[in-house]
Amino acid sequence: MTTKVNLSSGAGVTGVLSKANGGTGGTGGATLSLTPIVGTSATAVAGNHYYTTNALATALTFPASAAEGDAINFTTTNGKSDNSILRNGLTLMGAANDITLDIPDITTCWMYINSTWRII
């Protein structure tokens, strides 16, 4: 079962996202804290689900180090096609490149597996 959560209001939204119906969903079964990005950039900490709260392009910088199984989610709610994920020295999907999320209003779920951040 897939559930769409609309976070576009952003104001005062807090909470925890977790697996539903016994499935692992996009977090590998991890519970992630819902965390707003107030400005146009933030440095991620594993175990959080970040979402945009402004109308400008936003950059989420991943941690400089990670452990196998670490999870981070990123939801863009600003309608922009130039939000980005910055790798901070580690690889994303096995590549040494930052990623531009060119699809507006998307959620990407990431897990650190086999020495790289992967979309799951």
Image: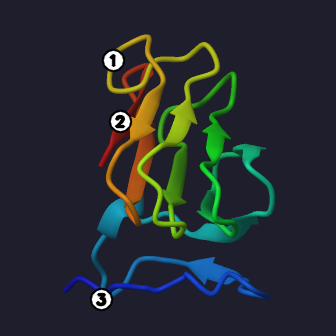
Say whether residue 70 is left or right of residue 22.
right
Q: At x 37% / y 23%, what residue is drawn?
A: 114
Residue flagged by tag 3: what amino acid is it? Asn
Q: Which of marks 2 and 3 is nearer the N terminus?
A: 3
Q: Earlier in the sequence, mark 2 or mark 1?
A: 1
**Secondary-structure class at tag 3:** loop
Residue situated in front as seen by the camera: 64 or 43: 43
Q: Are marks 2 and 1 in contact (CB under 8 Å)?
A: yes
Residue flagged by tag 2: what amino acid is it? Arg
Residue at the farthest left position: 1
Q: Residues within 10 Å of mark 1 (few under 14, many from 20)?
A: few
Disc 3 target residue: 21
Alpha carbon of mark 3 to alpha carbon of mark 1: how far? 31 Å
Q: At x 72% / y 67%, what residue is drawn?
A: 36
**Secondary-structure class at tag 1:** loop
Q: Give the numbered dot on residue 118.
A: 2
| Residue 14 percent coordinates (x, y) | 73, 83
| Residue 66 percent coordinates (x, y) | 61, 29
The residue mark sitting in front, 3 or 1, is: 1
Alpha carbon of mark 2 to alpha carbon of mark 3: how far? 24 Å
Q: At x 69% / y 66%, what residue is drawn?
A: 54
Quadrant the N terminus occupies: bottom left
**Secondary-structure class at tag 2:** strand
Q: Give the numbered dot on residue 94.
A: 1
Q: Earlier in the sequence, mark 3 or mark 1?
A: 3
Residue flagged by tag 1: what amino acid is it? Gly
Alpha carbon of mark 2 to alpha carbon of mark 1: how far? 8 Å
Q: Residues within 10 Å of mark 2 (few under 14, many from 20)?
A: some
